[in-house]
């Protein structure tokens, strides 16, 4: 049974809620510092990973053994999870989550009170793991439990293994997709959990995107999410260093942009398989192409992350930005609510709202395309503007 209409309805309902949740405080707060408590947390229990994606902006930390040693223990994570407001949406990201032997215990503790999604490369998935995960699936999407399982795959076998730099990875992920398909049939093809196949669009896999659609269709995945390549690295010194990562890669010689546009337009008009979505959400095909051409207008995007979402890093670092780490902010010394209204988080919202996106923000899942019908900030196009004005007020911890 196709779940395409249910998937599309759930996605639209979530986007509408998110829009209202951002717009109300954004319009009512004159200085743009205030927000409601976050409804969505990105939690990274580990950066350990069994593949080495060449586009990963966490790659330096994945190789840093000292950083791995700073991971919170399961007991510490349980304390963190228990302090999060009930029914919060928690997206578990990595690294590869199943590199932690206690990953399921963390998921189970979280799913008891919260709605959770997990992102994995699928190489370590087994029927036994899926059997355990299915015990966390709720009957309704507004109930606490496991709502979504997402796999990442970057192209056909040769292309994927080249991008992740580990031979045999493609076959292991495809095997994991097969196990997921079997589990859905075993437990009944009900609404939950939603299943997603994520591909980061880049020059090497541009011509493999149709293959990804066919693969998602073959394994009866609900959504093929095509993610814009974020040309950035994690900024661990705070937002003041965003422009240190602003020298963007040119794809002019590597990509046939007309062909790229044709492929994306073809995929978005198909209706015989999975729903096709983009990250950032709701971005038109032409805007996707502009980002890769480096002609996208930054003033036509808005960052929503610090108004609706926060990130918790493996050592407990707490941030209003998925890409930046603030050294003096840690969940071990505060709560989500207190951090959200701290000077650090309030000033970060003010800075992003008044300054606009940085070039390194393009492609971030925390940005939204809002079009040209609003007052422009001082930012200009990605292609020609890398500097930023002096901050109006520096966030202080």
Image (cartoon, grey):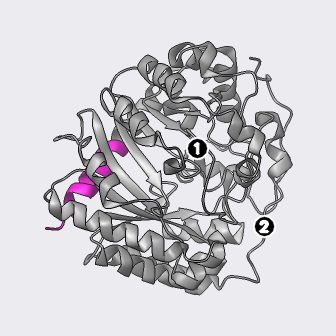
Taking 209 as reference, is 315 left or right? right
**Up-down relation of residue 369 to residue 161 (above or below):** above
Is-magenta flag for residue 5?
A: yes
For discs 2 and 1, the disc positioned in front in the rendered view: 2
Query: Which image quarter: residue 333?
Result: top right
At 74% across and 47% down in the image, what residue appears? 61
Q: Earlier in the sequence, mark 2 or mark 1?
A: 2
**Up-down relation of residue 388 to residue 96 (above or below):** above
User: For mark 2, what is the residue?
Assistant: 249
Which percent across, then down, holds residue 14? Answer: 34, 43
Residues packed near mark 2 inside 10 Å, few (<14), some (14 to 19) or many (20 plus):
few
Residue 213's tag is none
Q: CA distance from mark 2 to mark 1?
A: 22 Å
Circle 1: element type: strand
Residues packed near mark 1 inside 10 Å, few (<14), some (14 to 19) or many (20 plus):
some
**Up-down relation of residue 327 to residue 338 (above or below):** below
Residue extent of the magenta highlight: 1-15
Q: Quadrant of the C terminus?
A: top right
Query: Which image quarter: residue 173?
Result: bottom left
**Up-down relation of residue 269 to residue 32 (above or below):** below
User: For mark 1, what is the residue?
Assistant: 302
At 56% across and 12% down in the image, what residue appears? 338
Which percent across, then down, holds residue 63? Answer: 75, 52
Taking 269 as reference, is 23 left or right? right
């Amino acid at each position: 049974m196709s779940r395409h209409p249910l998937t599309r309805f759930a996605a639209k309902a979530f986007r509408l809620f998110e829009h209202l949740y951002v717009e109300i405080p954004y319009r009512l707060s004159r200085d743009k510092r205030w927000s409601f408590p976050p409804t969505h947390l990105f939690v990274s229990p580990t950066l350990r990973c069994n593949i080495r994606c060449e586009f990963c902006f966490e790659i330096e930390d994945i190789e840093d053994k000292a950083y791995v040693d700073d991971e919170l223990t399961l007991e510490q994570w349980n304390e963190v999870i228990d302090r999060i407001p009930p029914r919060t949406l928690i997206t578990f990201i990595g690294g590869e989550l199943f590199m932690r032997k206690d990953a399921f215990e963390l998921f189970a503790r979280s799913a008891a009170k919260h709605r959770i999604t997990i992102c994995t490369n699928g190489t370590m998935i087994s029927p036994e793991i899926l059997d355990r995960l299915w015990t966390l699936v709720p009957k309704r999407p507004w109930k606490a439990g496991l709502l979504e399982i997402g796999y990442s795959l970057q192209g056909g076998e040769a292309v994927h293994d080249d991008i992740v730099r580990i031979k045999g990875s493609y076959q292991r992920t495809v095997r994991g997709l097969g196990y997921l398909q079997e589990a859905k049939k075993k437990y009944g093809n009900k609404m939950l959990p939603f299943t997603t196949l994520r591909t980061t669009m880049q020059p090497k896999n541009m011509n493999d995107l149709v293959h990804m659609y066919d693969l998602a269709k073959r394994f009866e995945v609900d959504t093929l999410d095509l993610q814009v390549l974020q040309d950035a690295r994690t900024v661990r010194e705070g937002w003041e260093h965003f422009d240190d990562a602003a020298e963007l890669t040119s794809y002019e010689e590597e990509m046939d942009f007309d062909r790229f546009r044709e492929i994306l337009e073809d995929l978005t008009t198909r209706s015989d398989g999975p729903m096709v979505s983009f990250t950032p959400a709701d971005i038109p095909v032409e805007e996707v192409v502009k980002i890769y051409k480096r002609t996208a207008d930054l003033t036509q995007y808005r960052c929503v992350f610090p108004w609706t979402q926060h990130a918790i890093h493996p050592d407990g670092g707490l941030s209003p930005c998925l890409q930046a780490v603030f050294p003096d902010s840690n969940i071990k010394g505060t709560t989500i609510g207190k951090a959200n209204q701290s000077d650090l988080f309030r000033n970060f919202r003010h800075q992003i709202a008044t300054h606009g996106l940085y070039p390194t923000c393009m492609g971030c899942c925390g940005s939204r395309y809002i079009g040209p019908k609003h007052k422009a900030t001082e930012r200009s196009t990605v292609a020609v503007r890398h500097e930023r004005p002096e901050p109006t007020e520096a966030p202080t911890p």
